[in-house]
């Protein structure tokens, strides 16, 4: 059985051995396959060398994998009880970034820990989903229909979004807001409220334009017409399209990419790594990678709907939605369908903070699967 269900006993009463049995090992296998794909393509991005990207990524994965399993075996009620504290702790880190954060590439987004650069905005994606899942799972269906009910969670979204936008990090800001909106919808918030907020958001775009940094404005303008500055501001997206298209149907072969091998493609180990993959493995390889992502997202949704409590369901749906948004925005970005916003490809792009964030997310999803019979918040009863 892919998703074992506890029958008579609460999942939290299971022994450690039983909890291991309740893990969805197929879900874990998909995660490992995706990570290994990342290792191979980072090896290629470095010109056929484990240094400096693949070796560090492998070490991080091995460490974070143990961390993921530990989170999965933790009682889900621990995460429910401490959801707000985790949110506040990450919010403090975001404030600390504004005060004494490390500046890199013109942005103040990191806290220097010596052995790695910690990016608190990545962890806010998890902390926000945790806090919103607890809040939205506590109230009754009638309460969710009132405008006053969504005031507090809206503030919970707006404050970190404003801090992240100020760093500046438009990509993460968009992810925070979109993830929250989708979670609202899944919790049963009425549709007309989304339409009202959407209309209000569109109406302030002309005002918001003036608050964008020059490089952010240039990204939008270059998105509309990348050929206007092909050797400078439009270089990234034009080279990305050339690299993607040069792979054809079946690709040029592993380690045989010319655009990436000759360093025509900037940021090929981070945001634009999907084009490196496309050049070497072609359309067939890209579709296979997308299927792997879809399997992980689909399994997440299955785990969510197996949960007997609304907190677990919302938590998994929110985290799985975050993964979908990562994939969608990154691929749309490198194909020139949306402006470049600096969103990495999950488990494929190089980076410590993003990998740790994702492994924590996977651990929480598995935690809901292991403890799917625990009753928290509004009860959801199923007959299995």
Image: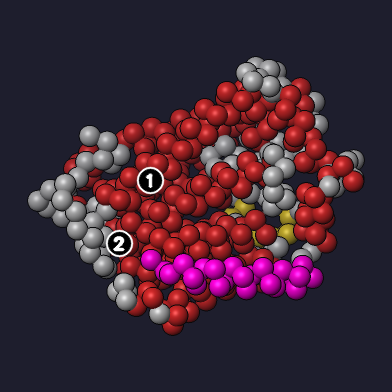
Q: Which residue carries the number 1 mark?
A: 300
Based on the picture, tell me whether residue 215 belongs to the magenta stretch. no
Residue 4, how many percent across, how many down? 21, 41
Q: Residue at x 70, y 30 (%)?
A: 244
Using the rendered view, name the quadrant where residue 50 is placed: top right
Q: Quadrant of the N terminus?
A: top left
Where is residue 76 shown, x and y percent of the image?
Answer: 29, 58
Give the tally of numbered discs. Answer: 2
Give the mark nearest the N terminus, 1 or 2.
1
**Residue 290 falls left or right of residue 278:** left
The correct choice, above or below, for 207 with respect to 321 in the image is: below
Percent x, y for residue 303?
A: 32, 47
Using the image as rendered, state which of residue 110 and residue 283 is in the foreground. 283
Picture residue at 26% right of the left edge, 67% below the top: 378
Q: Horizontal and vertical percent for residue 171?
A: 65, 56
- In this rendering, position of residue 282 left or right of residue 139: right
Q: Residue at x 55, y 29 (%)?
A: 287
Measured Cα–Cα span from mark 1 to mark 2: 15 Å
Question: At numbered mark 1, what does the secondary structure look like: helix, strand or loop?
Answer: helix
Which secondary structure dominates the residues rendered in magenta?
Answer: helix
Image-based side of 11 in relation to 259, left or right: left
Quadrant of the image occupied by residue 247? top right
Q: Is residue 204 magenta?
A: yes
Range covered by the magenta-colored residues = 188-210
Q: Secondary structure at mark 2?
A: helix
User: What mark, if any, has residue 152 been given in the picture?
Assistant: none
Q: Which residue is mark 2?
A: 310
Label 2 neighbour load within 10 Å: few <14, some 14-19, many 20+: many
Task: Tell me: residue 308, above or below residue 349.
Answer: below
Please indicate whether residue 258 sits to the left or right of residue 84 in the image: right
């Amino acid at each position: 059985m892919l998703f074992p269900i506890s029958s008579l006993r609460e999942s939290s009463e299971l022994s450690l051995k039983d909890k291991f049995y309740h893990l969805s090992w197929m879900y874990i296998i998909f995660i490992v396959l995706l990570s290994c794909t990342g290792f191979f393509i980072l090896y290629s991005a470095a010109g056929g060398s484990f240094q400096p990207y693949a070796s560090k990524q492998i070490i991080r994965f091995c460490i974070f994998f143990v961390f993921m399993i530990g989170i999965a075996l933790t009682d889900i009620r621990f995460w429910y009880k401490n959801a707000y504290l985790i949110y506040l702790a990450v919010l403090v880190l975001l404030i600390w970034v504004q005060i004494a954060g490390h500046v890199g590439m013109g942005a103040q987004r990191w806290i220097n820990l010596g052995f790695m650069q910690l990016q608190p905005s990545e962890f806010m994606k998890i902390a926000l989903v945790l806090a919103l899942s607890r809040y939205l799972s506590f109230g009754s269906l009638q309460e969710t229909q009132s405008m006053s009910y969504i005031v507090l969670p809206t503030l919970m979204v707006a404050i970190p979004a404003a801090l992240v936008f100020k760093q500046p990090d438009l990509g993460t800001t968009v992810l925070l807001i979109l993830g929250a909106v989708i979670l609202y919808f899944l919790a049963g918030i009425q549709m007309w409220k989304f339409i009202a907020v959407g209309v209000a958001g569109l109406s302030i775009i002309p005002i918001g334009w003036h608050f964008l940094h020059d490089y952010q404005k240039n990204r939008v303008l270059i998105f509309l017409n990348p050929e206007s500055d092909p050797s400078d501001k439009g270089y990234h997206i034009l080279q990305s399209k050339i690299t993607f298209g040069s792979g054809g149907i079946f690709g040029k072969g592993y380690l045989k990419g010319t655009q990436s091998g000759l360093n025509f493609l900037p940021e090929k180990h981070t945001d634009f790594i999907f084009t490196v993959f496309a050049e070497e493995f072609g359309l067939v390889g890209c579709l296979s990678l997308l299927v792997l992502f879809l399997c992980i997202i689909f399994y997440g949704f299955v785990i969510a709907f197996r949960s007997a409590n609304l907190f677990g369901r919302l938590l998994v749906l929110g985290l799985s939605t975050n993964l979908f948004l990562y994939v969608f925005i990154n691929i749309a970005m490198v194909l020139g369908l949306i402006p470049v916003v600096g969103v990495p490809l999950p488990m494929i792009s190089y980076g410590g903070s993003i990998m740790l964030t994702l492994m924590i997310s996977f651990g929480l999803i598995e935690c809901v699967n292991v403890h799917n019979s625990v009753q928290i918040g509004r009860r959801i009863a199923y007959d299995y």
